[in-house]
Image: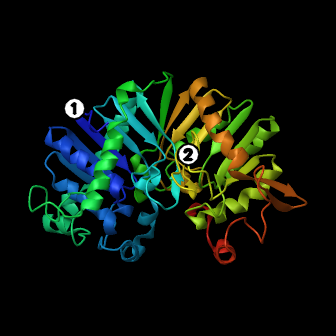
Amino acid sequence: MIEAAQKTLDIQYYAIHADTTTDALMQALRDAAARGVRIRILLDDLNTAGSNAQVLQLALVPGIEVRLFNPLPGSRQSQALRLLDALHDFNRIQRRMHNKIFVADNSIAITGGRNLGETYFGRGNASHFVDVDVLAAGPIVADLSRSFDQYWNNHLSYPVQSLKSRSDIEALARPASRLAVTGNDLPPGEGEPSNDGGREAERRAVAERARGFDLRQLKLTWAPALMLVDQPDKLDPEHEGSQEPTTIDGLMDLMRRAQEDLLIVSPYFVPGPQMMAVFGELRRRGVRIRVLTNSLASNDAPVAHVGYARYRKALLALGIELYEMRAEQPRRIRGLGTSGSELASLHAKVLVMDGQVIVVGSMNLDLRSYLQNSEVALVIRSRTLAAQATRAVEPTLGSGAYRLELRDGQLIWHAPAGMAAPTGWGEPDASVPLQLMLKIIGPFAPDEML
């Protein structure tokens, strides 16, 4: 998309991580700006500390504007110290722009669950996220572009140069030899090339793989779609308690229309009382509900598991089918994103309704997405895409996840066919110290904080 762009690139993300994959992407952005493409990058400010702060140096490149949404005070050299500096304004820390939108020339766009970083695209050797995005063309792209503009022009959106001096930006997270974003230890156009041949070779390999992905060869499925998006003022503490409908409100309204089947994929699943009421209504009408979420062992945010665990028995009592993804997965989970590793964590946010409607977005079905974060999703009416999504998810339900059962008031985890039953105490595959820690802190953590 970057290489094909001729006029504009609008990029809105919760996080852009500093690694080899984004190194190649940042270089592609610099190349696009050099050929006259106007580039706007809007980032939530929470994850722009430490090495991830390097992306802010793109603000010094002619033709590229970078803004930070809802910025936090403090140094960017350490994320932990920065959060400590901001504790006096805890409400601001909690309200984050979680949207993910990538728009080229106002004509083609990507949105979904992924942030930008190698762990979202099956690169590297560590555990990776299993994630899903959707590529969109046609009239819906204008809606995504308008949403980007709303956030870009909001009073909570700050140009990087209004927060940091040029020298401060140049010095952000400067490693000993070179900067991942600029390719030099000096601003673009200055200094000598780095001798870091290994990383440069990997960056070029990533760029080469991307060139093999030709947008012109893609077969698109044409279908009606609409966008659900939170208004940026949702993140403004001055508007706390606003009655403005949210993305999650829209999803719950959609769920209420289900007649036969609801398939939900959500990595962090804390339904809350309103969604539980919707589930209860659907089950009374005989609607089948299946949910795939993370197990404690696969969850990259174990504290979030506390909120989900509070609802498990009630969900099972309603007759909802619960599946928890195992941390160990095949190297490729066919269709449902790419793990790239035997260790994986679910990060996809997908809903399929009645085999006719599919939703892909940035939202988790939890109270944080409902009350505190801003989110975006596409609702697509397409039997073809709904069938593709169902075929992608169902193999994980059968062979990559534990199925939960409520028996005599106790939780039972059933292993996938051909695997030994879980052994040990409590949550399968999770360490005893982790389980004990969560049992200790669990009673003190409200659902909306998880």
Where is 218 relative to 241, above or below? above
Question: Visible in this render: residue 285?
Answer: yes
The residue to which callout 2 is attached is 349
**396 vs 166, nearest the viewer:** 396
Residue sticking out furthest to the right: 408
**315 vs 149, nearest the viewer:** 315
**Quadrant location, the C terminus:** bottom right
Residue 72 placement (x, y as % from top left): 34, 66
Where is 151 relative to 3, above or below? below
**86 vs 102, nearest the viewer:** 102
Residue at image position (66%, 45%) is 396
Q: Is residue 384 left or right of residue 170?
A: right
Q: Residues within 10 Å of mark 2 (few under 14, many from 20)?
A: many
Residue 263 placement (x, y as % from top left): 67, 39
Where residue 314 sits, quadrant-wise, is: bottom right
Residue 66 placement (x, y as % from top left): 24, 52
Residue 20 placement (x, y as % from top left): 34, 56
Residue at image position (46%, 24%) is 220
The residue to which callout 1 is attached is 6
Q: Residues within 10 Å of mark 1 (few under 14, many from 20)?
A: some
Where residue 420 sits, quadrant-wise, is: bottom right
Label 2 – label 1 distance at C-alpha: 31 Å
